[in-house]
Image (cartoon, rainbow, N blue to C red):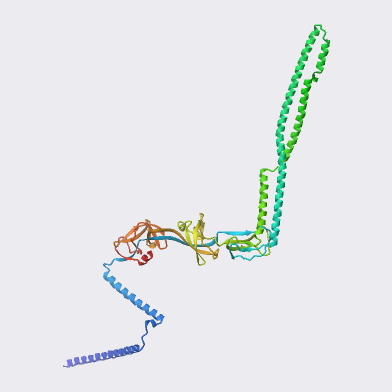
Amino acid sequence: MEGMKNADTEIVSENEEYTAVDTAVTDENVKKRKKKKEKKEKKEKKPRVKWKDLPKETRKKKRRRYILIGVAVIILVLIISAKISAANAKMPVFTAPVTVGDVEATITTSGNVESDLTKTYYSRISGTIGSVPVKAGQTVKAGDVLLYFDEQSLVLASKDAQAASLTSEGSYNDAMNQNAKTQAKLTEATVNLEVLEQQITDYKAFIKQQEYKLQDLRNARKAELSAWGMELAKEQAEGEDVSEEMAEYQYCQETMELSKDLVDIQRTIDDAKEILSNLTEYKAEMKSQKSATEDNVMSGTTKEAKQTSNEAEQLKNTQTIEYADSVTGGLKAEFGGVITEMTAVEGAPVTAGGALVTVASNEQVHVTVNLSKTDLAKVKEGQKADVTIAGKKYEGEVTFINHMATINSNNMPVVSAQIAITDADEEIFLGVEAKVIIYAQKSENVLLVPVEVVNSDKNGDFVYIVEDGIVVRKDVETGVSSDTYIEIVNGLKENDQVMTDVSLAITEGMEVMPITDEAASVESE
């Protein structure tokens, strides 16, 4: 009994202890409920604020919190789903269809704007500058006055040119007349010498002939007289009286040279010798005349040079007169452009040939760009381009590709090319940098895939496609490429599903679940 009492006492004590604990818990709960009730009453008393009335920053914070909660829920669901179906799931991959369309390769570069036509105006007179209404850096139009000459300078220059023209023409005519006279004397001497040579030759031959004739006649007479003498001597030896015949014989011997035929021949010889002497003397005179005129007569080259010199002088003077007349109202621009240099100074003297002003056309301009060896393979003369200068867009065309490379600042070879601006206007700025987009190669109605899907290895270019849920490698031949798409020349067909994102986990032959890459599809369309 005593034990039971003790047990009861312990139970009572324990119960009292529990009762105390319960009481404490109950009091604590009562306090919590009381606080919660007070908080709820306070919240109910606070007016409810609508979403649209919340401050912008508060809405942003709440929206961010809701998004984070939503993402966390989705991730949790995906994790749970993945654990449930991991054993049977196929790896999802993004694909895009091979499409048909147009693709154009463009090359973006920059270069400096330069003028195709630059002209420096030079003065054709010596004189004084009047006024200069424009300055360097200013734009001008065709026909605008660049500067004025002093009017008195123009009048004086015109008169000086006229006088110089007359002097040159007179000097040339005098030289030609004198040369004509000299040429006539040379011709006379040349012709006469030819005739005299023949005459002298003929007379020498004639004299020689007559001398032979005279000698033959003498010899014949001497032979006759000798035979006659011998006959008289024989007759005398035979005792005949030949005294009278001997006297006649002696007379014939003494007067043989005075016989008429011998005298006539000798006279002919003497006359011929006198003529020969005169011819020889005249020949010497003609030789002297020829020698003198040969040194003074103009050669064909000299005559042509004098004529050319006179014509040049006449042309120069004519141009000076015309120039003075043309700039009476001021020196005018021949084309629109920018004044790059103004040398003329108002009131300052200027000499013929002196520079006055330089104008660079802003109507015929181009942009010079440098092309790498990769870009060079795509660029051809005649291709179109867009040129942007100071925010304004112009049309351009590739007109020249240099065939001599240069080394740029990076020590790489580059080739310069010129892009002509076909719609240039007066708003063009020379010397500034311009942005250029060259429309290079273009293919139309061809198979296209996104650029990023094409891979390369030692065997060439290839892509991965999905056929019946299986990853398949396809070797391809590519063509024209833009920043977004590349032409497939061989290896694929339209609507083949090309993988757009290939990770290291993807291998050929793997079963996958294709998901259409909406971004790639939209761009393709």
Q: Is residue 264 above or below residue 181?
A: above
Q: Position of residue 443 (x, y in %)?
A: 41, 58
Residue sitting farthest toward the top = 239
**Residue 472, percent across and down?**
32, 60
- Inspect this view and state whether residue 415 appears: no
Name the residue located 69 percent from the left edge and 57 percent from the top edge: 158
For residue 434, side relative to residue 196 (left or right): left
Residue 481 to residue 180: above or below: below
Q: Among all residues in the image, which is located at the extreme left?
A: 1
Quarter of the image with the N terminus is: bottom left
**Count of numbered labels shown in the rendering:** 0
Looking at the picture, tell me which residue is in the foreground, 3 or 50.
50
Q: Position of residue 297 (x, y in %)?
A: 70, 42
Q: Nearer the viewer, residue 237 or 179?
A: 179
29 over 439 or under it: above or below: below
Q: Give the image quarter of residue 321.
A: bottom right
Q: Is residue 479 visible?
A: yes
Screen quadrant of the C terminus = bottom left
Determine which quarter of the picture holds residue 342: bottom right
Name the quadrant containing residue 32. bottom left
Q: Is residue 251 left or right of residue 337?
A: right
At x 78% / y 26%, what residue is drawn? 270
Q: Percent x, y for residue 30?
A: 29, 90
188 and 241: which one is in front? 188
Residue at image coords 72%, 24% = 209
